[in-house]
Image (cartoon, rainbow, N blue to C red):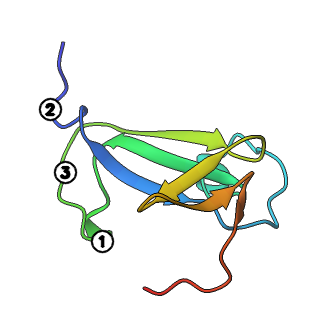
């Protein structure tokens, strides 16, 4: 069985709310917890410009506080759940 649009990433984000210190089992909080990243497979959020449509929106959260790293343009900018740069140019 194939669900249309479920094989696409609908959302990707880095959690920045360091006031949330433990998982709550409520995805609306857990996906925003500082030191985590999350992505959703399936439907994107149209209000944020997302175009993917699907019958599902499956959120997945990853704790990055132990040995987690994110690199962009071959530069490490996030390690162990913390940003390594003080200013980000958008």
Question: Which residue carries the number 2 mark?
Answer: 4
Whether the residues at callouts 1 and 3 have beta carbons within 8 Å, the answer is: no
Check disc 2 and report its element: helix, strand or loop: loop
Question: Which residue carries the number 3 mark?
Answer: 52
Q: Quadrant of residue 77?
A: bottom right
Indicate the position of residue 40 as horizontal and vertical percent values: 41, 44
Quadrant for the N terminus in the image: top left
N-term-proximal mark, 2 vs 1:
2
Q: Which sits in the foreground, 3 or 74?
A: 74
N-term-proximal mark, 1 vs 3:
1
- Of circles 1 and 3, which is in front? 3
- At x 53%, y 48%, the residue is 38
Quadrant for the C terminus in the image: bottom left
N-term-proximal mark, 2 vs 3:
2
Check disc 1 and report its element: helix, strand or loop: helix
Residue at the farthest front position = 74
Whether the residues at callouts 2 and 1 have beta carbons within 8 Å, the answer is: no
Q: Which sits in the foreground, 31 or 12?
A: 12
73 vs 55, left or right, is: right
41 vs 21, left or right, is: left
Q: How many numbered marks have been drawn onto this rendered protein structure?
A: 3
65 vs 2, left or right, is: right
Indicate the position of residue 43 as horizontal and vertical percent values: 28, 47
Residues under labels 2 and 1: Cα distance?
20 Å
Check disc 3 and report its element: helix, strand or loop: loop
Indicate the position of residue 57 as horizontal and vertical percent values: 36, 42
Question: Which residue carries the number 1 mark?
Answer: 47
Residues under labels 1 and 3: Cα distance?
12 Å
- At x 19%, y 26%, the residue is 3
Indicate the position of residue 50 as horizontal and vertical percent values: 24, 62
């Amino acid at each position: 069985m194939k669900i249309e649009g479920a094989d696409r990433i609908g959302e990707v984000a880095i959690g920045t709310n360091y006031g949330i210190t433990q998982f709550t089992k409520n995805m609306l909080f857990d996906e925003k917890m500082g030191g985590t990243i999350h992505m959703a497979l399936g439907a994107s959020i149209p209000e944020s410009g997302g175009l993917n449509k699907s019958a599902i929106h499956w959120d997945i959260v990853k704790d990055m506080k132990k040995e987690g790293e994110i690199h962009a343009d071959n530069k490490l900018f996030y390690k162990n759940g913390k940003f390594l740069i003080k200013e980000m140019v958008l």
